[in-house]
Image (cartoon, rainbow, N blue to C red):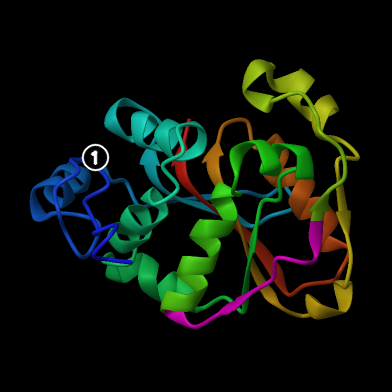
């Protein structure tokens, strides 16, 4: 497969077995935040993210989600795991759960961008991936088209939890691509909290 589809840097397109060349890696490092925001009134404890949602990062995420560039998950994860602080934090979780997308949207896009990231992170650091617990039961209006109040109403009742026993007393990391108002993350974590996990945190590539 590497002969037919050789690995390339997801940013500049040059051949690179790590999916990220040194030049682009240095450029990402100048924009990386690797921040942690604490919360008291949400269903999750804290939010971890790598970038602000702007400039080159915004373009990378949009390409990843909407322009059939699914391979960019390799570039993102390879950059993420080079950060020792975040690497140690991620290894402290028992399981990682990707934000689910509706079956119709998954069919249209061809992949769930959060699942690809979660799968690669879980494999790389050796924690469990749970992709069969949280489901999106209806195809709602895209959150990006709504304001904060509309997002909160739009997302209610959109998710369902099965196999809650798999999550009991577990330290959970919920993964999504972008954090804007937090409506999606909080609603998903609300559903996950019914399984009585030890704690829930949120991780995204970027924060808007």
**Percent from the top left, x then y, of residue 27?**
15, 42
Whether residue 8 appears in magenta in the rendering, the answer is: no
- Tell which of 79 and 101 is nearer to you: 101
Q: Provide the residue span drawn in magenta.
A: 125-134
Residue 49, position as x, y percentages in the image: 44, 49
On whether residue 132 falls in the magenta region, the answer is yes
Point 59% across, 49% down: residue: 111
Query: At x 20% / y 65%, what residue is drawn?
Result: 17
Residue drawn at the location 76% of the way across and 38% of the way down: 104
- What secondary structure is found at the residue carrying circle 1? helix
Using residue 91 as the reference point, say whether residue 24 is left or right of it.
left
Q: Is residue 128 above or below residue 25?
A: below
In depth, the one of 25 and 201 nearer the eye is 25
Examine the residues drawn in magenta and state their main secondary structure: loop
Classify 48 as above or below 124.
above
Marker count (numbered)? 1
Q: Position of residue 106 (x, y in %)?
A: 68, 43
**Mark 1 = which residue?**
31
């Amino acid at each position: 497969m590497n002969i037919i589809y050789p690995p390339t840097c997801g940013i500049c397109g040059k051949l690179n077995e790590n999916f990220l060349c040194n030049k682009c890696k240095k450029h990402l490092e100048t924009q990386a935040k690797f921040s942690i925001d604490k919360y008291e009134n949400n269903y999750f404890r804290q939010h971890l993210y790598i970038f602000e949602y702007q400039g080159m990062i915004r373009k990378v995420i949009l390409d990843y989600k909407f322009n059939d560039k699914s391979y960019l998950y390799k570039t993102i994860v390879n950059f993420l795991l080079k950060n020792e602080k975040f690497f140690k934090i991620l290894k402290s979780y028992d399981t990682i759960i990707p934000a689910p997308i509706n079956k119709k949207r998954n069919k249209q896009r061809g992949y769930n961008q959060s699942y690809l990231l979660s799968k690669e992170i879980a494999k790389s650091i050796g924690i469990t991936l749970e992709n069969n617990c949280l489901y999106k039961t209806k195809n709602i209006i895209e959150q990006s088209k709504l304001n904060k109040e509309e997002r909160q109403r739009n997302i209610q009742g959109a998710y369902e939890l099965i196999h809650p026993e798999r999550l009991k007393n577990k330290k959970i990391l919920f993964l999504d691509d972008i954090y804007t108002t937090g409506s999606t993350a909080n609603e998903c974590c609300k559903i996950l909290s019914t399984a009585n996990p030890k704690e829930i945190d949120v991780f995204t590539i970027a924060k808007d």
